[in-house]
Image (tube, coloured by chain):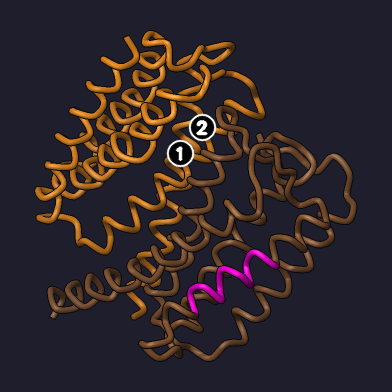
Chain colours: A brown, B orange
Amino acid sequence: MLLLPEHFDANEIYVLCVGFLMVSVFLSLPRKFSSVETYLILLFNFFLSSVFDQILAGDILDCYDIMDDPKFEIMDMFIYFFIYPISGFLFMYIHTFVPRQLKVLYLILAVVITMGLEWISDLFDVYQYKRWNLLLSGISYFFLYALNIYFLKYVRKFVLRSRETLH
Amino acid sequence: MLTFYLVIKLVLSVLLILTVKMLWKKIKKIEAVVYYLTIASIMQISNNIVALNLELITFKEAGIVIPILQLDRLIILPIITLWLIYFYRSTTRLLSFYLTIIWASLFIATTYANNFAGVLSIEKWNAFIGFTEMFVIYVLFIGFNNFFKVIEERV
């Protein structure tokens, strides 16, 4: 059973505003990926966030809590559905415009920006670190964004193959 | 005991990964990716709801427990689910129904096996709760996948 927030205060309002902003940006962007690619990028980031957050913030390791309650609440689900997947999508979207020789620099820049956004989120009490810190998040983001790049590469290969089998 | 249990899980995972090639006869690779990502995410969240929010199951201390649980959630159960989809496409509807019940039972059996091995301890959880959990997982899984099918057909 998903729990409701203990108190509806700054962190919930912050998460809702960020979610609203991200969905607005996502919907207003000109199409760059096919519907299947878009779905897969969003699903892959939903998968990454649910798996990594459940391992790190779950009952066993308990490195940090998200929102008010150490338990799983509805706002956690909101973050998994809207904020993490769209962040991954935006990273991939901009990535397609970056020239090949600047890709690594872009990856590092994206990690720094995401760390900055996490720092702001921390100010709003979205995260409560226990055995975790911003630097560890930065290292994780580096690998997660790199995984996204490789994932899209494979997805494009599979989509192409499945179209060939259809024709 | 736990190390031996982990070795069994590892062997089982490798064997299941080796069977994945056989799935390509009935399932497209892109579909398999979607099915895998969907079921693994849903299982991860639902298992944590049962453990964290409802406190029906408690886990032993970190260490060897994490790889054992993650092998279940990320390899064994998702690949079994892919096989379920494979059988949906190659058997009758009645047989598919029975296979779905076996699939849910396998998940429940895994939880009991984990309890027996000392990975977790069952507090107020039982097979009926397990079937309810699997019903929710199944409905969400089918819903997400049908949504993907609609998107795929529109392309």
Residue A111 magenta-highlighted: yes
> In the rendered view, would you say A95 is above or below B130?
below
The verdict on a common chain for dots 2 and 1 is: yes
**Amino acid type of the residue tagged 1 in the rendering:** Met
- The answer to whether mark 2 and mark 1 are in CB contact below 8 A is yes
Q: Is disc 1 surrounded by few (<14), some (14 to 19) or many (20+) residues within 10 Å?
A: many
Residue at x 81%, y 43% (from the top left corner): A5
Q: Position of residue A67 (x, y in %)?
A: 76, 46
SS at circle 2: helix
Relative image position of residue B12 (x, y in whole percent): 20, 28
- The quarter in which the C terminus of chain B is drawn is bottom left
Question: At numbered mark 1, what does the secondary structure look like: helix, strand or loop?
Answer: helix
Q: Residue at x 42, y 81 (%)?
A: A103
Total label count? 2
Query: Magenta residues, as a range?
Result: A106-116
Residue B153 higher or lower than B131, as above or below? below
Compared to residue B18, the image places residue A59 above or below, namely: above
Residue on which disc 2 sits: B47
Identify the disc placed on residue A117. none
Which chain hosts label 1?
B
The location of residue A87, given as percent across then percent down, is 58, 69
Q: Any magenta on residue A91?
A: no
The spot of residue B115 in percent (x, y) is 43, 12
User: Where is mark 1, residue-wise?
Assistant: B43
Q: Is residue B35 left or right of residue A60?
A: left
Q: Compared to B143, does B47 lie above or below?
A: above
Say if residue B5 shows up in the picture: yes
- Kindly indicate the quadrant of the structure image that contains residue B99: top left
Would residue A3 be found to the left or right of residue B60 on screen? right
In terms of image quadrants, where is residue B147? bottom left
Q: What predominant SS class does the magenta segment belong to?
A: helix
- In the shown orientation, is residue B120 left or right of residue B155? right
